[in-house]
Image: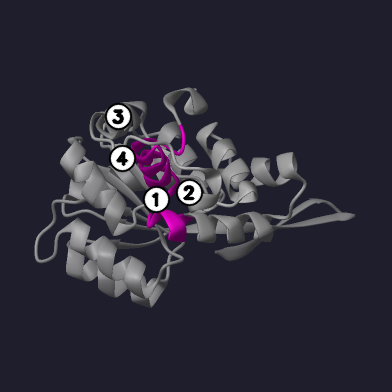
Amino acid sequence: MIDVIRIMNPNELIIEKKIRVMIADDHPLVRDSLNMHLKDQPDIEIVGEAEDGLQAVQLAGELLPDVIIMDISMPRLNGLDAIRKIKTQWPDIEVLVLTVHDDTEHILKILEAGATGYLTKNILGKKLIHAIHAVMSGESIFSDEIKNRLLIHALRYPLKPAIPTIGEILTAREMEIFQLVARGMSNKQIAQEMNLNLRTVKGHFVSIFSKLNVNSRTEALVTGLRIGLITLDDIK
């Protein structure tokens, strides 16, 4: 992010962070539409645009944006492979997938590649802006339709029937955090709820994701459901 200085009055100086966003989509009209929705946001800056997956990877390394809005069906290198390359080399870059694909196979592959959010292209305007802010706050963003598909898939294809004890996978503290994630709490809300600082919460997430072999909150929830770590009631 870059710093933006905003003066409220002569005695008050506030330094804000602009979210640096890169767009990767092979359709000029889509890129123009995204620009139109984001250009007037005071805390968002469009730093670059890519027309294909190879260019997306190249620009990601040159620009180091905070968030990349990524299409999946692109020439030269598809978005899925581009996400894998970007997350391998620059894991701190958040990737928000915006695509027409909403089938379970695509969703699971994109989650495995390391995307932080998955939205269909009919979601723009305020919802897109909210999604950008949310992924920067440590949340995983998925439309209700996408999330429902993931949950149905998880319940239809469980990995094992028995419910493991907490100690088999997560520590008691990690399990407590995981249950708050299931309730939809952000990193900041979890920190406040458990009287922890944000760095400690993020450290627990690193451990949870590593133990569950996942890359995002939603993938963690899906895995938790599939192995019986949480139930559907925990996320209601």
Q: Say whether marks 1 and 3 touch (CB < 8 Å).
A: no
Which color scheme is applied?
Answer: one colour
The residue pinned by badge 1 equals 116
Q: Is residue 184 visible?
A: yes
User: Which amino acid type corresponds to the residue marked 4 in the rendered image?
Assistant: Lys
Residue 172: x and y, percent? 63, 47
Q: Is residue 217 magenta?
A: yes
Q: State the separation of the CA atoms marked 4 and 1.
A: 26 Å
Secondary structure, magenta segment, majority class: helix
Tag nearer the camera, 2 or 3: 3
Q: Is residue 41 visible?
A: no
User: Which amino acid type corresponds to the residue marked 1 in the rendered image?
Assistant: Thr
Q: Earlier in the sequence, mark 1 or mark 3?
A: 1
User: Which amino acid type corresponds to the residue marked 3 in the rendered image?
Assistant: Leu
Tag nearer the camera, 4 or 3: 4
Q: State the separation of the CA atoms marked 2 and 3.
A: 26 Å
Tag nearer the camera, 4 or 1: 4
- Neighbour class for label 1 at 10 Å: few (<14), some, many (≥20)? many
Q: Say whether marks 2 and 4 touch (CB < 8 Å).
A: no
Q: Is residue 75 above or below residue 142?
A: below
The residue pinned by badge 2 equals 135
The residue pinned by badge 3 equals 155
Q: State the separation of the CA atoms marked 1 and 3.
A: 22 Å
Between 46 and 144, the one nearer to me in the picture: 144
Q: State the separation of the CA atoms marked 2 and 4.
A: 31 Å
Residue 12 relative to residue 103: left or right: right
Q: Say whether marks 4 and 3 touch (CB < 8 Å).
A: no
